[in-house]
Image (spheres, coloured by chain):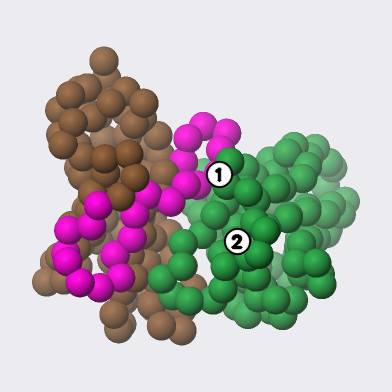
Amino acid sequence: AQSVAQPEDQVNVAEGNPLTVKCTYSVSGNPYLFWYVQYPNRGLQFLLKYITGDNLVKGSYGFEAEFNKSQTSFHLKKPSALVSDSALYFCAVRTYGQNFVFGPGTRLSVLP
Amino acid sequence: DSGVTQTPKHLITATGQRVTLRCSPRSGDLSVYWYQQSLDQGLQFLIQYYNGEERAKGNILERFSAQQFPDLHSELNLSSLELGDSALYFCASSAGKGLNEKLFFGSGTQLSVL
């Protein structure tokens, strides 16, 4: 069975500092990996995805994520955090024959 | 705006009742997904439809059912409601059924069972 872990419930970072939101996954087969963001009272919004190819994926709003096959990780990063990045972030995985599995979410707070 | 419309936004009802949640996918999207989001369970996949046919089933209770109509809108029916069914229910859509397709989420229906 496939699963996604986001080891941190909460990440706090100062505005202007780099941020990392961690995600590890477990699948049998090749993973398709996604990051989504949820703002208060809104549905989830797609940020980026990894399908194949370059391990560094660039997405919306300056976010990027690095796929590491040996560590089965897909951490979300941004070089300089903004207060407006404060939200709930979900990592998700999908593989052949399986539907999306979402992680528990990580709440990011960017402090001014 | 994702283009996915969910109604109603809020629903308050009593235990034992039945409710229907409605979802209109993005124009042209053939796949509709239903998810339940709660504080203790996180985001749980319930069911997926593709072009009117059930494609995948997740942790959906027998008291719950769904369908996708010829115009591609979908309804999620929840019956014999219990307090524990209180949650945010999301609908999402995608163009097809490919593994690499991203989901577009509606804003959700907040269900409160009293």
Q: Chain of mark 1?
A: A
Horizontal side of residue A4 vs B86, given as left or right:
left
The tint chain A carries is: brown
Chain shown in green: B
Where on the picture, by quarter, is residue A109? top left
Q: Which mark is residue B93?
A: 2
Does residue A42 belong to the magenta stretch?
yes
Q: Chain of mark 2?
A: B
Secondary element type, mark 1? loop
Q: How far apart are labels 2 and 1 at the CA level?
A: 12 Å
Asked if labels 1 and 2 touch by Cβ distance under 8 angstroms, the answer is no
Q: Give the residue displayed 56% in from the left and 38% down from the top.
A: A42
Q: Give the residue displayed 76% in from the left and 62% down from the top.
A: B73
Indicate the position of residue B74 as horizontal and vertical percent values. 76, 63
Q: Which residue is mark 1?
A: A43
Which amino acid type corresponds to the residue marked 1 in the rendered image? Gly
Indicate the position of residue B52 as horizontal and vertical percent values. 74, 76
Other-residue count near label 2 (Cα within 10 Å), few / some / many at <14 / 14–19 / ≥20: many
Q: Which residues are magenta?
A: A38-58
- Give the mark toward the camera: 2 or 1: 2
- Residue A108 visible within the image: yes
Residue farthest to the front? Answer: B28
Horizontal side of residue A49 vs B88, given as left or right:
left
Indicate the position of residue B18 as horizontal and vertical percent values. 87, 54
Other-residue count near label 1 (Cα within 10 Å), few / some / many at <14 / 14–19 / ≥20: many
Horizontal side of residue B79 vs B26, given as left or right:
right
Indicate the position of residue B83 as horizontal and vertical percent values. 72, 46
Q: Give the residue displayed 11% in from the left and 71% down from the top.
A: A70
- Residue B33 visible within the image: no
